[in-house]
Amino acid sequence: VQSAFATTLRDIGFDVREEVCYGGKRFDIIARLNGCLFGFEIKIHDWRRALRQLRAYQLCCDRAFLVKLGAASDDLIRQCAEAGVGLYVMNDVDGQTRRITGSRRSLLWSAYYSASLMRSFAQNDS
Amino acid sequence: MIADFTHFLRLGTHAEAETFRRASHCFDALVLNANLVEGSPAACAALAYQLGKPFLIDPYTYAFAVPHHYLLSRGKGKVSQGEPRPKRSFVGLAHAYFGENSGFVGTRSLRPEDVTPKDLTERVLDYQSSRLRRALSDPTEKYIAASPRLDPSLRIAPYFPLMDGLDWLPVNISCVTEALLIDPDVCALLAVGYDVLESQVTHLVDAIAQTGVGRVIVWVDNFDEDRAPRTALDVYSKLIHGFHDRGVVPVNLFGGFFSCIAQTKGLGGFVHGLGYGENRGIIPVLGGGQPPPRYYARPLHTNLPVLDAASIFSALSNEQYLQDVCDCVICERLINEGGVSYLFSALADTDEKGRFKPQAYALTRFHFLLSRKAEVDLFVTLDPVKRRLYLKRDERLLTDLDSKHFAKHISLWQDYL
């Protein structure tokens, strides 16, 4: 799921890194576009845990998203909206992705974390 | 002298020694593992002498009873990468403990019938008393070598693990009995698997207490007090209380903040490493290298990845953080320089290759020691009602920060006060 989604992002013009480490955490996908950082946590099950993990993304990414395999329940959509986390779902048959909700920049976002993550991102270039 | 409730710090590698020296006021006593002593006796002697604190040497005898391949190594760096060989420190220890019968190391593990308790006990206790001194053979070091600072405060009888049954218990008991004849203040060490402990807790307490030993160090295999369910905490508490009831002071060899709570059951102290080593498996024998910096979250009483901690506490104002989370000198200085986000970004600072900077290691370690010292000192002075309120306050803070899922253990621990 992760590789397929990373490919989708690359196809639409994002600069993409997988498994980016920073601050003792490993981020599934970090993507850069127009100087902004976008974080994507991939989950097949246990989306509640994913929402908790996404708080770390929100510290350092301009936008953070959950990518879930299969359908999205109303509860999931509501909680993503409350957390300011965007939501994509990926069809488990044909791999098509669909955006369900958008993301907003978290109040937790900090330029300190963002600059550090950007360094880790750049390091993955080499 | 060993205090009533003793906070021990275990040296993991000599890379940590400078932190131990600079933060020596943050712990009561030092623990050195015998394999580290054997590998670097002069450096261990120097640290013990400079700290001038009570210390003890864990003789690590259990390592010879686990499957022998856990003591093998292929070497590192320029050393040959060929056939795995027993690590030199364990060969040296085996020679000290078993003399000319030490040839089994690297080919098979020790069996109970191989051990002569009297001989082994004499050698193991002598090792703890003399190894650091023998490392200082230079004439210029003779005054240091003669210093009482190099006398361990307690010596530990040989011990072997009770993992799948009680096969080693008679040997362990014989060793404690022999050790008490040599040194009435000697300490027993119980290294036990959880399943054996659960089924034999009363028997184990009786067997050790009947030797007449005054102090026992307990090591429950892989016992993670932060994640342990109520049933496991009950069994552990029964062990601690059982020893206390029989007049034996128990000390936890791998413990964290729950050890402060377990004082109420009679625990007399606990040992941990520099931000890690609050639980450990009996196998593998050797650790996995230096862990990355983690942040000790005082309201959670546990270490977290720095960014997880940042996601919990970054919503706080500077004043709230210093009042409700931590006001150690590290946190205070960094917050005054740039606020809460700046604090966590400094603790997670990486170089251009994505590796944690040495400063991040240093800051997280000092923060850990200062925080742990503050909470241990405070908790010891609180009465039971205030201890409960203290944990309730932590629980409330985490609930307010929408992070209660991190603190399930805090709710559970309150039942043990």
Image (spheres, coloured by chain):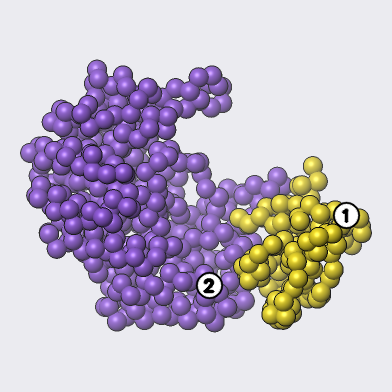
Chain colours: A yellow, B purple
**Observer-nearest residue: B107 or B290?**
B107
Q: Is residue A73 left or right of residue B391?
A: right
Residue B145 rendering spot, x and y as whole percentages: 25, 32
Q: Is residue B235 in view from this perspective? A: yes
**Chain letter behind tag 1:** A
**x and y percentages locating residue B369 in the rendered image:** 42, 58
Mark 1 lies on residue: A10
Q: Residue furthest front?
A: A93
Between the C-alphas of marks 1 and 2, the distance is 35 Å
Question: Considering depth in this image, is B176 or B140 the residue closer to the camera?
Answer: B176
Query: Which residue is located at x 62 percent, y 49 percent?
Result: B356
Q: Secondary structure at mark 2?
A: helix
Does any portion of residue B272 appear in the rendered image?
no
Name the residue at 80% across, 76% down.
Answer: A101
- Mark 1, Cα crowd under 10 Å, few <14 / some 14-19 / many 20+, is some
Question: Where is residue A57, by image quadrant?
Answer: bottom right
Mark 2 lies on residue: B405
Q: Secondary structure at mark 1?
A: helix
Name of the residue lying farthest toward the right:
A12
Q: Chain of mark 2?
A: B
Q: Residue at x 66, y 55 (%)?
A: A26
The type of residue carrying mark 1 is Arg
The C terminus of chain B lies in quadrant: bottom left
Image quadrant where residue B4 sits: bottom left
**The one of B378 and B248 positioned closer to us in this rendering:** B248
Q: Position of residue B19 (x, y in %)?
A: 44, 49
